[in-house]
C-alpha cells in the first residue's frame, strides 16, 4: 500500500476518517496536526501567534514529504494545499478530498471543543466560508477522488474510500 492522503477544509472529517480508515485497514495513521504539535512543542494556535503562519507551513511541508514515504493514512491540515511545494508533492499521490457543505463545515468548526483552529478563531462565519471557497478549487484540482462528508457516517465514507482506492 502506498500512502493515502486526506485533504479538505477544517471540519471536513480528515482526523475522524483517517482513524477509522486506519482501524479498517490496519494501516499506520499520521495526523499531521498532532505530529506537528509534538514537534513544535506547543499548540498550533500558539505557534501561529508566536512565529507566524509561514513558519508553520515550513514545518508542515517537511512533515508531508516525510509522511508520504510511508505506507500510511495521512490526515493533513486544511491549509497544506496552499504551498506550491506541497502541491508538487501531492500531484501523483492517492489524494482524497473530503468535502462538505460550507454551512456544515462552519457548524462543525464552531461545535468542536477539542481542536482549536487558528485560521477560524477570530473569524466570523462569513469569513470562514470565504476562506473555504478560496481553497475549494485547489482541493478539487489535487484530489484523485472527492467524497462529500456532509451527510455520511464515518463508516460510509471509509467504505467509499475503499471502493475507490486499492489499499
Image: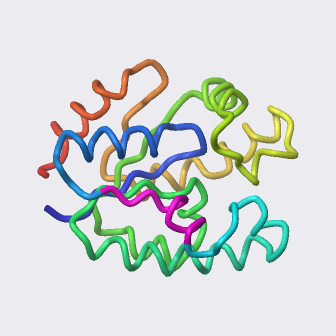
Which secondary structure type mostly characterizes the magenta part of the structure?
Answer: helix
Could you tell me which residue is drawn at 25 percent across and 39 percent down? 161
Q: Is residue 114 magenta?
A: no
Quarter of the figure with residue 159: top left
Could you tell me which residue is drawn at 72 percent across and 76 percent down? 54
118 is higher (above) or lower (below) than 163: below
Across the whole image, how many numbered discs are drawn on residues?
0
Could you tell me which residue is drawn at 31 percent across and 38 percent down? 20
Picture coordinates of residue 118 (x, y %)?
A: 75, 54
Q: Is residue 146 left or right of residue 107?
A: left
| Residue sitting nearer the eye, 127 or 3 | 3
104 is higher (above) or lower (below) than 164: above
Quarter of the figure with residue 160: top left
| Residue sitting nearer the eye, 105 or 42 | 42
Could you tell me which residue is drawn at 63 percent across and 75 percent down? 40
Picture coordinates of residue 23 (x, y %)?
A: 24, 42
Picture coordinates of residue 143 (x, y %)?
A: 38, 53
Q: Is residue 32 magenta?
A: yes
Q: Is residue 63 left or right of residue 160?
A: right
Residue that extends furthest to the top in the rendered view of this protein: 151
Q: What residue range appears in magenta?
A: 29-38
Amino acid at each position: 500500500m502506498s500512502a493515502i492522503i486526506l485533504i479538505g477544509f477544517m471540519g471536513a472529517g480528515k482526523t475522524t476518517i483517517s482513524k477509522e480508515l486506519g482501524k479498517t485497514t490496519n494501516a499506520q495513521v499520521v495526523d499531521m496536526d498532532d505530529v506537528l504539535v509534538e514537534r513544535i512543542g506547543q499548540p498550533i494556535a500558539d505557534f501561529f501567534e508566536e512565529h507566524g503562519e509561514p513558519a508553520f507551513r515550513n514545518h508542515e511541508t517537511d512533515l508531508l514529504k516525510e509522511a508520504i514515504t510511508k505506507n500510511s493514512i495521512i490526515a493533513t491540515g486544511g491549509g497544506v494545499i496552499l504551498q506550491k511545494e506541497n502541491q508538487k508533492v501531492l500531484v501523483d499521490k492517492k489524494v482524497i478530498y473530503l468535502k462538505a457543505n460550507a454551512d456544515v463545515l462552519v457548524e462543525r468548526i464552531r461545535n468542536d471543543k477539542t481542536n482549536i483552529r487558528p485560521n477560524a478563531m477570530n473569524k466570523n462565519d462569513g469569513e470562514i466560508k470565504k476562506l473555504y471557497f478560496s481553497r475549494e478549487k485547489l482541493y478539487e484540482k489535487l484530489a484523485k477522488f472527492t467524497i462529500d462528508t456532509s451527510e455520511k457516517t464515518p463508516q460510509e465514507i471509509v467504505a467509499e474510500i475503499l471502493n475507490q482506492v486499492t489499499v
